[in-house]
Image (cartoon, rainbow, N blue to C red):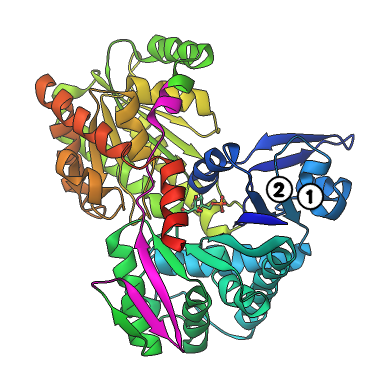
């Protein structure tokens, strides 16, 4: 029986299954996982997560009761083998195509969304998937244990778990933005109510910024008629109260710098230097995710080149756009749009001895660390983002890097004063910010860089987690 538990869709490890049936274990990816991995390394915390692939399911079959630590060197992890069809509907259709779209304002409303019978079946699966987590957590948690439920995949679990185990202290944390009521009202009323009351099943609901916390409280007021004390951050509904907290996740600067000083990163730096020479570098590092706004970022670079011929041959845009969620057609189309736009820039501007744009489409962590270290400008221009840790990692690894940052990223709340803030839809404004960043005097870069670094490391993962445990009581 555990005294502290974490529940999230993606776990700290994932497995791939080769043709000969051999399993290979890898550390999991993404902001949530890297933050929490640091937390569990230092403590005795059980992590409950879902099997995401055939490789993961193969691993669960070798682990008694899904406890991976009984069969692999993982630390305490229980992986849930949810039937693939249920998982697919819960993860792809509801979590990633509905809740993610609502909270990141991604719908193209003349065509989507549409909530008919198909959606109802998907919603049923989302309930089952959340129920599977609640059931496993109820089984694993010791009396009075603290359970930290993560993200939009698991909005219903807190209320379900409370019914099973009223003795537990339950927290929910949203790693995404939260949409204002006008946009949240796109969802069917009963779904909205279920999501909100699901999270209100927790004693503490955490958000990355005050803006997202406010939007959640506004939704509780608007849709449930809940009593909300905005100043104290308390929502009262149905004879229960939920405390709302703001916990802006930061980066462990020391660990990141240590990793970025390793020889594999150094050799990537040498390889990049060979490619770009002494030209200035504009870097971006993203998953090819609709909310990351990569196409407008590339278009802004193109507009910058059109307006500033004096920079031709003197700058290279190193863009990392790793594959993401390719089960969804929107993501496959978006990846193609990114590649089309990159090719157009190449066709228009490349010369025999100058590649204006290098697009990296393979996930290569040491190479991206090398790019951070060499960046003169870091471009982070999401349509909307819960936090965006790229904006925090860059300044830690490059003291003289100027940051062009979307005002819609959660990170803007802390980094805004020292970044060049842009409206993510304003391509011309973003092109102007790229120019300003490239021509920023050295002294100012260093001054801003030092303050960015301080803000980025203000709340490293371990303290971020401890703050939430303390808030939970
Ligand atoms: O932004 C919230 C978050 O949980 C990230 O931490 C993570 O990268 C993403 O959403 C989920 O991605 P995936 O579907 O690849 O697990």
* Of the pair 293 and 52, the residue shown nearer to us: 52
**Measuring 51% from the left and 34% from the top, which residue is drawn there?**
361
Is residue 249 left or right of 149 when viewed as pictured? left
The 10 Å Cα crowd at callout 1, few under 14, some 14 to 19, many 20 or more, is many
Residue 95 seen anywhere in this rendered image of the structure:
no
User: Does label 2 point to a residue whose CB lies under 8 Å from ligand 1?
Assistant: no
**Measuring 25% from the left and 44% from the top, which residue is drawn there?**
405
The image shows residue 151 at horizontal and vertical percentages of 51, 61
* Image-quadrant location for residue 62: top right
The answer to whether marks 2 and 1 mark residues whose Cβ atoms lie closer than 8 Å is yes
Is residue 402 left or right of 294 when viewed as pictured? left
Is residue 439 left or right of 315 when viewed as pictured? left
Residue 389 seen anywhere in this rendered image of the structure:
yes
**Measuring 20% from the left and 48% from the top, which residue is drawn there?**
422
* Of the pair 302 and 457, the residue shown nearer to us: 457
User: Does label 1 point to a residue whose CB lies under 8 Å from ligand 1?
Assistant: no
The answer to if 250 sits in the magenta stretch is yes
* Of the pair 183 and 206, the residue shown nearer to us: 206
* Image-quadrant location for residue 211: bottom left
**Which is nearer the N-term, disc 2 or disc 1?**
1
Q: Is residue 442 above or below residue 426?
A: above
Residue identifier under label 1: 67
SS class, disc 1: loop
The image shows residue 80 at horizontal and vertical percentages of 75, 58
The image shows residue 88 at horizontal and vertical percentages of 69, 63
SS class, disc 2: strand
The answer to if 305 sits in the magenta stretch is no
**Measuring 71% from the left and 48% from the top, which residue is drawn there?**
77
Q: Which residues are magenta?
A: 231-257
Mark drawn on residue 77: 2
For marks 2 and 1, give the CA distance: 6 Å
């Amino acid at each position: 029986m555990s005294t502290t538990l974490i529940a999230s869709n993606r776990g700290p490890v994932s497995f791939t299954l080769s043709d000969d049936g051999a399993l290979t274990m890898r550390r999991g990816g993404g902001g949530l996982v890297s933050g929490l991995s640091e937390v569990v390394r230092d403590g005795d915390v059980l992590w409950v997560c879902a099997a995401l692939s055939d490789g993961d399911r193969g691993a669960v079959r070798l682990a008694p009761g899904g406890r991976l630590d009984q069969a692999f060197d993982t630390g305490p992890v229980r992986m849930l083998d949810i039937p693939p069809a249920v998982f697919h509907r819960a993860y792809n259709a509801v979590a990633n195509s509905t809740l993610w779209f609502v909270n990141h304002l991604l719908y193209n409303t003349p065509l989507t969304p549409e909530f008919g019978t198909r959606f109802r079946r998907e919603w049923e699966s989302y309930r089952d998937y959340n129920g599977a987590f609640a059931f496993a957590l109820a089984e694993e948690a010791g009396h009075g244990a603290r359970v930290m439920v993560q993200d939009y995949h698991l909005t219903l679990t807190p209320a379900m778990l409370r019914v099973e185990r009223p003795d537990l202290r339950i927290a929910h944390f949203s790693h995404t933005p939260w949409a204002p009521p006008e946009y949240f009202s796109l969802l069917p009323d009963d779904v909205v109510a279920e999501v909100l009351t699901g999270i209100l099943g927790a004693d503490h609901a955490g958000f990355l910024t005050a803006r997202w916390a406010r939007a959640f409280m506004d939704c509780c007021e608007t849709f449930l008629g809940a009593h909300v004390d905005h100043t104290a951050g308390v929502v009262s509904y149905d004879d229960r109260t939920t405390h709302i907290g703001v916990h802006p996740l930061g980066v462990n600067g020391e660990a990141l710098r240590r990793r970025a000083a390793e020889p594999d990163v150094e050799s990537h730096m040498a390889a990049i230097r060979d490619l770009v020479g002494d030209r200035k570098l504009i870097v971006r590092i993203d998953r090819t995710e609709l909310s990351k706004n990569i196409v407008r970022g590339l278009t802004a670079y193109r507009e910058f080149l059109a307006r500033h011929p004096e920079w031709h041959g003197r700058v290279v845009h190193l863009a990392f756009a790793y594959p993401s969620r390719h089960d969804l057609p929107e993501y496959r189309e978006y990846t193609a749009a990114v590649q089309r736009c990159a090719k157009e820039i190449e066709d228009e501007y490349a010369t025999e001895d100058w590649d204006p744009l290098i697009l990296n489409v393979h996930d290569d962590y040491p190479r991206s660390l090398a790019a951070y270290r060499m960046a003169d400008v870091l471009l982070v221009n999401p349509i909307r983002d819960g936090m965006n840790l790229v904006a925090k990692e860059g300044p830690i690894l490059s003291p003289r890097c100027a940051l062009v940052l979307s005002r819609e990223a959660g990170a803007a709340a802390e980094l805004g004063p020292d970044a060049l803030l842009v409206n993510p839809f304003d391509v011309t404004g973003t092109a102007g910010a790229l120019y300003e960043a490239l021509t920023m005097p050295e002294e100012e870069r260093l001054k801003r860089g030092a303050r960015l670094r301080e803000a980025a490391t203000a709340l490293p993962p371990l303290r971020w987690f401890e703050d939430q445990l303390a808030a939970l009581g």
